[in-house]
Amino acid sequence: MDQQYFGVSLEKLLTSGGQTLYMVAWSLIIGTIIGIILALILVLCRKGGLAENRILYNIVSIYINIVRSIPFVILLVAIMPLTRTIVGTTIGSTASLVPLVIYISPYLARLMENSLLEINPGILEAAEAMGATTWQTIRYFLLPETLGSIVLALTTGTIGLLGASAMAGYVGGGGVGDLALTYGYQRMNTPLMIFTVVVLVIFVQILQFAGNTISRKLRQHK
């Protein structure tokens, strides 16, 4: 018989933790790639940008605002047909990646847009004077100069993803949220619910500390 902790087997606890890490990690990777692309479009295509294109800027900006205005739980349910089309199911950790990516990429895009807009205009003027192409400006000036701030944006996004992944448990996404709901709340297992909360709080503290430390070191080496 498996050893029980808070009324749940150790295997179930480890599986739930692994599902949460799986959802957060893959959503963060894919969401970061999309978020950076969206952020660069917003920065480069805005009025006075290096590749000014107001139509594209407005389309991306409106899309981001729409998605960010929808609470994650509602978004989770609203795009179930899309999730089923892409993954083939709406249940499980992999299916949860679709709403998580759609949720986090606009969020990260706005955070990284703010980071990119903090760059000293003189740096961009220097890049232009040197004859740098748009890609070279992004690769050698924009991203390196704002890397510390982007790390903080990613830290905030990761913490937001952690909370969203817990909510995914309400629709069969698995992870810590499902553990707290199915084995904690529905079975009135208060110790388990407290345990999951404590674990999440500790994880958030570790993430924030790591993000702050990395960002500070990057800023010092600029």
Image: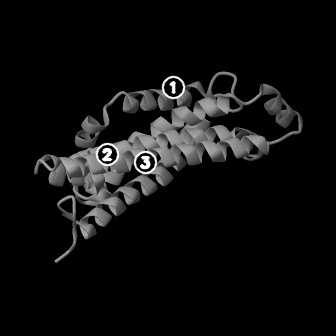
First in sequence, mark 1 or 2: give its number. 1
* Residue found 25% across the figure and 60% down from its top: 88
Q: Which quarter of the image is occupied by the C terminus?
A: top right
Q: Amino acid at mark 2?
A: Val
Q: Is residue 77 above or below residue 174?
A: above
Distance Cα–Cα, label 2 vs label 3 = 9 Å
Nearest-to-viewer mark from 3 and 1: 3
Q: Amino acid at mark 3?
A: Ile
Residue under label 2? 197
Q: Residue 21's x, y, as percent?
A: 40, 58
Q: How many residues crowd mark 3 within 10 Å: few (<14), some (14–19), many (20+)?
A: few
Q: Of the residues shown, which amino acid type is indicated by label 1?
A: Asn
As helix, strand or loop, the secondary structure at mark 3 comes to helix
**How crowded is the residue under tag 1: few (<14 C-alpha within 10 Å), some, or many (20+)?**
some
User: What residue is rendered at 29% in x and 56% in y?
Assistant: 175
Q: Secondary structure at mark 2?
A: helix
- Of tags 1 and 2, the one toward the viewer is 2
| Quarter of the rendering containing residue 89 | bottom left
Q: Nearer the viewer, residue 78 or 53?
A: 78
Which of pointers 2 and 3 lies earlier in the amino acid sequence? 2
Give me the C-alpha separation between circle 3 and circle 1: 40 Å
Q: Nearer the viewer, residue 10 or 22?
A: 10
User: Farthest residue in the left direction?
Assistant: 187
Residue 217 relative to residue 64: left or right: right
Q: Secondary structure at mark 1?
A: helix
Residue pointed to by mark 1: 58
The disc placed on residue 202 is 3
Residue 3 or residue 73, whichever sits in front: 3
Side of 65 where 76 appears, left or right? left
Q: Is disc 2 in contact with disc 3, using a CB cutoff of under 8 Å?
A: no
Quarter where residue 26 is shown: bottom left
- Name which of mark 3 and mark 1 comes first in the sequence: 1
